[in-house]
């Protein structure tokens, strides 16, 4: 092998290997500091693109969860109002039944009618206050609400409104209902019974809708967790593996520096030929 002071092949090889080791070391240090093996598109374009798409899905599902939570709250408020209406209808039935007693005197029946009208009017007040986020499902102002069901907005969960206003199709008792005689009080019993039955059916419908919203909210949360895990499988670094690799590369780097130093000193032997 010829000796040359202009071209030191050994030093060039040692330098190339040292540069490669240094590059690998920087990559490993970046993975350890970020916890990611794919931190940018430069690391792995395809994996990065997939991860970014899934991250967008996870972010969109946060909006879905917010929508479902709002929908659940609206329905729960409506159910609370409906339960109160059902209780008040039961009280109205009690007053009307008591007033239908023919042995009751006029003064007592008038007192019962006063209680009856007070409770009747309270139904309207209760319904008007059953509002959440500006939405009321039981006073007739809203026929239905929709909640987001998926990340692209194409899926919806619809909840129908239940108009429990007096004189409607559910609460058939009129807003002016009352009694002055035992006969008129007895006549209200059938209407009140029908209203109680209708309200119970409406509550069952709202309850089913609330359960559906709760179930889908739970599913979306689990779906987010699964997608997050999938993203981690694609881009997260194996910290134990990277730690072991770091130790090896640091040792390799030190040896590379030594090899380069030795290669640089090799040209000094040429001087001995001229002594």
Image (cartoon, rainbow, N blue to C red):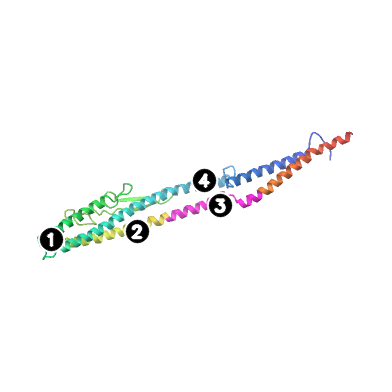
**Residue 15: % across, % down:** 73, 40
Q: Are marks 2 and 4 in contact (CB under 8 Å)?
A: no
Which callout, 1 or 4, points to the residue nearer the camera?
1
| Residue at position x 72%, y 40% in the image | 16
In front: 224, or 131? 131
Residues under labels 2 and 4: Cα distance? 36 Å
Label 4 sits on residue: 52
Q: Residues within 10 Å of mark 4 (few under 14, many from 20)?
A: some
- Disc nearer the start of the sequence (1/3): 1
Label 2 sits on residue: 208
| Residue at position x 71%, y 42% in the image | 18
Badge 4 element: helix
Q: Residues within 10 Å of mark 2 (few under 14, many from 20)?
A: few
Q: Main secondary structure of the magenta part?
A: helix
Residues under labels 1 and 4: Cα distance? 75 Å
- Disc nearer the start of the sequence (2/3): 2
Label 3 sits on residue: 233
Label 1 sits on residue: 108
Give the residue furthest to the left: 106
Q: Are marks 2 and 3 in contact (CB under 8 Å)?
A: no
The magenta-colored residue range is 218-245
- Disc nearer the start of the sequence (1/4): 4
- Numbered badge on residue 45: none
- Disc nearer the start of the sequence (2/4): 4
- Disc nearer the start of the sequence (4/3): 4
Residues under labels 4 and 3: Cα distance? 13 Å
């Amino acid at each position: 092998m010829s000796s040359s002071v202009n071209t030191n092949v050994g030093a060039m090889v040692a330098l190339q290997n040292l540069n490669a080791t240094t590059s690998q070391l920087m990559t490993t240090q970046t993975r350890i500091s970020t916890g990611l093996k794919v931190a940018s598109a430069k690391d792995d374009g395809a994996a990065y693109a997939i991860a970014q798409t899934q991250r967008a899905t996870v972010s969109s599902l946060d909006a879905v969860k917010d929508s479902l939570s709002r929908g659940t709250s609206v329905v729960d408020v409506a159910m609370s109002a409906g339960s109160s209406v059902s209780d008040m209808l039961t009280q109205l039935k009690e007053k009307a039944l008591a007033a239908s007693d023919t042995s009751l005197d006029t003064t007592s029946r008038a007192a019962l009618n006063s209680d009856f009208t007070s409770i009747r009017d309270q139904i309207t007040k209760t319904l008007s206050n059953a509002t959440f986020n500006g939405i009321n499902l039981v006073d007739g102002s809203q026929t239905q609400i929709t909640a987001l069901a998926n990340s692209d907005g194409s899926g919806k969960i619809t909840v129908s409104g239940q108009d429990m206003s007096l004189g409607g199709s559910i609460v058939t008792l009129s807003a002016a209902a009352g009694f002055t005689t035992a006969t008129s009080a007895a006549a209200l019993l059938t209407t009140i019974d029908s209203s109680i039955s209708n309200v119970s059916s409406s509550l069952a419908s709202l309850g089913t809708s609330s359960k559906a919203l709760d179930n889908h909210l739970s599913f979306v949360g689990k779906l987010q967790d699964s997608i997050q895990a999938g993203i981690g499988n694609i881009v997260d670094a194996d910290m134990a593996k990277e730690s072991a690799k770091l130790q090896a590369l640091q040792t390799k780097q030190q040896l590379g520096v030594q090899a380069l130093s030795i290669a640089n000193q090799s040209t000094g032997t040429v001087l001995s030929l001229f002594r």
